[in-house]
Amino acid sequence: MPYANQPNVYITQLSEENVKYIIEDTDLSVANSLRRVFIAEVPTLAIDWVQIEANSSVLHDEFIAHRLGLIPLTCDDVVDKMHYSRDCTCDEFCTECAVQFNLHVRCDSEMTKPVTTRDLIPTNIPCRVVPVPSRQREDDSGEYCDNDDILLVKLRKGQELKLQAYARKGFAKEHAKWNPTCGVSFEYDPDNSLRHTFYPKPEEWPKSEHSELEEDGHEAPYDPNGKARKFFFNVETSGALTPGNIVLSGINILKRKLSDLQTQLNQEIAQQHDALMMN
């Protein structure tokens, strides 16, 4: 069965951090479905199980485990090849469903020692799953800076932190730590011609970057018969996946869900038809 419309997609900006594109000739429901899938159903890897052997820092075990879970991990090359832990045949963890990290830091000096994501060492070397800021670090200086790796905890002299962590595959419907995006937004009426937003003072409202008004214009005339058909998307990644991979993966997931829905509907219709024939 042919689709009711054939959307057109135009990529306007693509970088390592975000992708901006335009979708035309589709419905608001489709655009919002894409936004929700990008956020909640695109799978990534995140630390989901932590075994702490020694912790004499000021943070308790649960606090450190929570901070580890929120670290974004690069997984573009491996996430599609890995199994969900619930679908794997292993007893606990294996290379098919998990990535193991070890961390062991002890402070023996008078200076405070920061423990960062750089101290998370994957056991299978070489490993393509690493904390995001570590991949972008260029210098090898021992000093910690605010723009370097993610800080987990600081240790004083005599304090120690030793643990094992396992990253597993999941999606943000289960927990927000598997969210591959920092933000997904779209705009469909930059000049407010549909009046879906009420501007008490249009001249004080910031003008959209997609506005087609003149420089002295503030709001387009009301179009009572207008309909949203053009959507300006901006997808920003957390670093776990590239922006393009998020979009492509999300589209494939949405297509699969629609296909499954159509299959179920056809089965229901066939069962009802058979029941009517028997009667």
Image (spheres, rainbow, N blue to C red):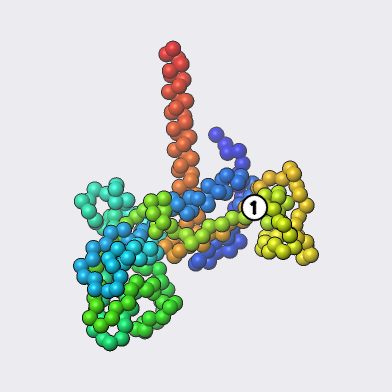
Residue at position x 39%, y 59% in the image: 177
Q: Nearer the viewer, residue 22 or 218?
A: 218
Secondary element type, mark 1? loop
Query: Is residue 105 found left or right of 143 in the rendered image?
Result: left
Query: Is residue 107 found left or right of 242 in the rendered image?
Result: left
Query: Is residue 126 found left or right of 209 in the rendered image?
Result: left
Q: Which x, y percent locates residue 41?
A: 44, 50
Under mark 1, the amino acid is Tyr
Instruction: Identify residue for label 1.
Output: 188
Q: Which x, y percent locates residue 211?
A: 70, 60
Residue at position x 25%, y 83% in the image: 157
Residue at position x 29%, y 48% in the image: 86
- Where is residue 199, by image quadrant? bottom right
Query: Is residue 155 found left or right of 225 in the rendered image?
Result: left
Q: Which x, y percent locates residue 264?
A: 44, 32
- Where is residue 154, by image quadrant? bottom left
- Where is residue 137, by image quadrant? bottom left
Examine the rendered structure and indicate whether residue 253 appears above or below residue 245.
above
Q: Which x, y percent locates residue 57?
A: 27, 74
* Quarter of the figure with the C terminus: top left
